[in-house]
Image (cartoon, rainbow, N blue to C red):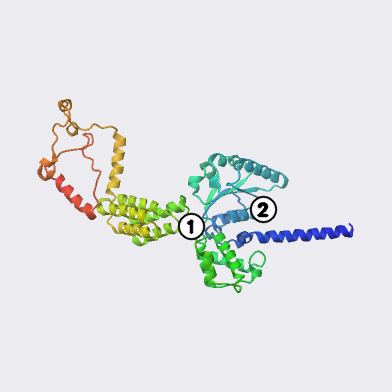
Amino acid sequence: MSSGSRSRERHGAAVSAELTAGSAALRPLADRMRPRKLDEYLGQAHLLAPGKPLRQALEGGRLHSMVLWGPPGTGKTTLARLIASHAQAQFLALSAVMAGVKDIRAAVEQARAERQARGRPTVLFLDEVHRFNKAQQDTFLPYLEDGTLIFIGATTENPSFEIISALLSRARVYVLKALSVEDLMAVLQAALSDPERGLGPDQIRAQPEALDLLARAADGDARRALNMLELAAGLVAARDGELTLAIAQEVASGGRRRFDKGGDQFYDQISALHKAVRGTDPDAALYWLARMLDGGCDPLYIARRVVRMATEDIGLADPRALSLTLDAWQAYERLGSPEGELAIAEAVVYLACAPKSNAVYVAMGEVTEDVERFGTLEVPARLRNAPTRLMKELGHGQGYRYAHDEPEAYAAGERYLPDELPDRRYYRPAPRGLELRIAEALARLRDKKT
């Protein structure tokens, strides 16, 4: 090789190294700091601590298809990569947002080629698997059956609703949890000190309370924590190299807690609010209300649900509850945020403290079942309307007792249900609030003789 050729080769290698270093520097901090081995992986001790199910499977070499279900930033993609690496398997990644059946088939061909050439298994990772429709999910099934692919899907949505049962039956579901503040603090400190992938060369001095704020503002999401740290690092450079609480507050402002409108967290939180009201816990009810508002939930949606709580769980134990919730709804429509939210909060506290009765709710359920079960039962003749002579001749209205002409405006012994259902009791007042007096009044009237 000539000296000129060697010179050009060295120059080319230097340029390549420089480009590689430059591209690495352009990668977000969160991507650069991905754990490279299981021992670096933080969080999910319920799955990966010694003796836990997934750890045992990996250590025993039992690679299997799985679905990783958890909120954003909990390490689903990273865990899939580490699983493949630990098993010395080929790792192929697809995103359901961009991939289609054609991409799946190409991955299958790669997997077959890898198995034939090197005898290695292939892990196919599908991010946001819930975005694939049924037909697209069906495409995986034959390749899981014959062992061509080990499937790992990642989702933030409930697999029970979003993934077909045939695929779920061939994959184990692992639930990932939001990272603790302690875990996130460790993630941030590792990024600050890492000289190769992190911010170690910048020699940033971080106030403990600043890191604590970032960890709490990240709300269990390691990606969000590292993104905020990277933003803060840009501000630190111009401010004496110290990450202060003021800088942390600046980059963390405007963040919201996890709340996926229309997803599991949305329904879990409205469920918690409803159950706190039903359980007569005004403090918990206010907490879940504030969590939903903080997450960006439409207050009008909450107002509608609060009206439902008034009818389902308070009912006639306190009839004022329904009026108050409707007033709160109207107050929000007139005032908007944040003033109108206080009216909704007032309604929530009132419902939580009010006496509880689901008697009407239960009665409607039971009577609806009877309507469906017995079909179109005839209206007893005595209860029918008789506006014409023909109707009167047919016996409509005969024998009807006008209640206002009876003592206490009560026709003792009269029956108003269809004759086939003479003894039904659907409405059973609760022994609380106004319904206690309603129950007493009904019992007294029913004891009267004809």
Q: Quadrant of residue 106?
A: top right
- Tell me the element at label 2: loop
Q: Toward the viewer: 5 or 220?
A: 5
Q: Residue furthest right?
A: 2
Q: Residues within 10 Å of mark 2 (few under 14, many from 20)?
A: few
The residue under label 1 is 258
Q: At x 30% / y 40%, what residue is drawn?
A: 368
- Tell me the element at label 1: loop
Residue 271 in the figure: left or right of residue 222? left
| Rendered view: 149 above or below 230 | above
Residue 435 at x, y percent in the picture:
22, 52
Q: Quadrant of the N terminus?
A: bottom right
Residue 358 at x, y percent in the picture:
29, 50
Let me know if residue 182 appears in the view: no
- Counting every numbered tag in the picture gives 2
Query: Which of the labelled discs sits on residue 280, or is there none?
Result: none
Residue 437 at x, y percent in the picture:
19, 53
Q: Quadrant of residue 351?
A: bottom left
Q: Toward the viewer: 426 or 391?
A: 391
Name which residue type carries label 2: Gln
- What whole-number distance in Å separates the C-alpha atoms at marks 2 and 1? 35 Å
Residue 120 at x, y percent in the picture:
68, 48
Q: At x 48% / y 45%, what residue is drawn?
A: 161
The residue under label 2 is 88
Query: Which mark lies nearer to you, 2 or 1?
Result: 1
Name which residue type carries label 1: Arg
Let me know if residue 144 appears in the view: yes
